[in-house]
Image: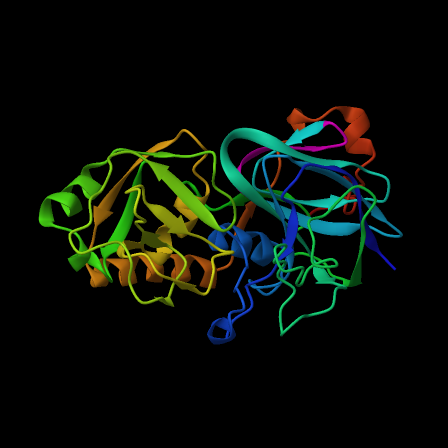
């Protein structure tokens, strides 16, 4: 059976699909991708459902190969360094991974996460209807854990992408991370007006303490007007809690199901990936928007995903002749003696 084999990898690499929905009431985390837009683009580029299981790759990077047959793959997300048999590829790309060839993803100029989608279905069991990995509870993915060297993931059946190969054209993935849009509340009344203004003025720096559960911010100390404990209530991805120390925490994909700190604002859905891709040390500011603007921003992303993903042919002058001859790039021949 055709499969992916992990040759080397850093920490934090997991299998993620669209998430484990419908179980928050029971305390079960949604998980799913940190950058849902990039995850969906990679899947769509190889003809999969946008919520299909794919590999979420962290800054530690990964190197892998195909076994027992070729695989059509797509990479999208942060500006990672992508190479195939040491030949550079665009950061967002569709390619064929032949058995024995080595695909390597490494941290590049920007971004925290990129996604590797494989045309076909990863042969992994669903847990509560999802293959999303939640490593803290050992649920989903490959044995409920991060991937490691030697892992083999079967693809059954291996599919064929929408194109033989090329650069993915995805302007919505080009998202400067300095401004993140938010909706006020739901507990904005726990903060005086000058504290809300301080929150929006920032600037905030992304702390290295963050992970898939939360993004920690460093900046002005926010003071609570009515205490910093509330009856625990449900939390959404992007909810911005302010604990007693006054430094905001943005809850992300592996967040807990409930929280007991006041939430001064919530990152809009369209900007969750923008925040997730911001590296530690990045300075950001928040901008409050209306519900209507938040809905329109998400609708624009939805319209992009609903349209065919554009893929541009790779420039062959970027590759050596030896590499090209080994890629089986010839799709036919033309008799010069015959018209057309």
The quadrant holding residue 32 is: bottom right
Tally of marks: 0
Residue 54 against residue 104 in the figure, above or below: below
Q: Is residue 84 magenta?
A: yes
Q: Residue 127, position in %: x, y?
A: 67, 70
Quarter of the image for residue 59 reads top right
29 lies left or right of 203: right
Coordinates of residue 65 in the picture (x, y in percent): 80, 42
x and y percent of residue 309 in the render?
A: 52, 54
Horizontal arrangement in the rendering, residue 246 relative to residue 83 (left or right): left
- Judge by depth and name the residue closer to the eye, 124 or 264: 264
Q: How is the image coloured?
A: rainbow
Q: Which SS does the magenta portion mostly show?
A: strand
Please indicate, yes or no, whether residue 5 appears anywhere in the rendered image.
yes
Q: Residue furthest left?
A: 193
Position of the N terminus by quadrant: bottom right
Tell me which residue sits at (74%, 59%) in the image. Answer: 143
Is 167 left, or right, of 123 in this rendering?
left
Camera-side residue: 112 or 315? 112
Q: Is residue 177 visible?
A: no
Identify which residue is drawn at 36% across, 50% down: 271
At which x and y percent is residue 259? Answer: 38, 61
The magenta stretch is 77-86
Q: Is residue 9 magenta?
A: no
């Amino acid at each position: 059976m055709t499969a992916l084999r992990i040759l080397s990898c850093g920490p934090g690499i997991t299998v993620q699909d669209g998430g484990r929905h419908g179980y928050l009431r029971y305390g079960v985390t949604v998980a799913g991708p940190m950058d849902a837009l990039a995850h969906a683009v990679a899947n769509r580029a190889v003809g999969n459902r946008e919520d299909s299981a794919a590999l979420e790759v962290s800054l530690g990077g990964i190197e892998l190969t195909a076994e027992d047959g070729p695989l059509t793959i797509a990479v999208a997300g942060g500006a990672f360094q992508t190479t195939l048999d040491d030949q550079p590829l665009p950061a967002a790309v569709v390619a064929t991974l032949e058995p024995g060839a080595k695909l390597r993803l490494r941290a590049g100029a920007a971004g925290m996460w990129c996604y590797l989608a494989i045309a076909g279905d990863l042969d992994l069991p669903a847990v509560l209807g999802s293959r999303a990995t939640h490593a803290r509870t050992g649920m989903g993915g490959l044995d409920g854990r991060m991937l490691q060297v030697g892992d083999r993931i079967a693809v059954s059946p291996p599919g064929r992408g929408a194109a033989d190969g090329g650069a993915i054209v995805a302007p919505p993935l080009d998202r400067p991370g300095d401004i993140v849009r938010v909706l006020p509340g739901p507990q904005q009344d726990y903060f005086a007006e000058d504290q809300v203004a301080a929150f929006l003025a920032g600037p905030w720096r992304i702390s290295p303490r963050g992970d898939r559960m939360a993004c920690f911010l460093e900046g002005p100390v926010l003071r609570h007007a009515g205490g910093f404990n509330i009856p625990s209530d449900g939390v959404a991805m992007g909810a911005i809690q302010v604990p007693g120390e006054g430094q905001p925490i943005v809850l992300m994909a592996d967040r807990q199901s409930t929280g007991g700190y006041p939430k001064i604002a919530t990152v809009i859905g369209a900007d969750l990936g923008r925040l997730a891709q911001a590296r530690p040390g990045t300075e950001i500011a928040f901008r409050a928007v209306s519900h209507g603007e938040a809905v329109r921003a998400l609708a624009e992303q939805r319209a992009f995903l609903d349209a065919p993903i554009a893929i541009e042919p790779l420039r062959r002058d970027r590759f050596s002749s030896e590499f090209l001859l080994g890629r089986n790039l010839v799709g036919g021949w033309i008799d010069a003696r015959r018209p057309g």
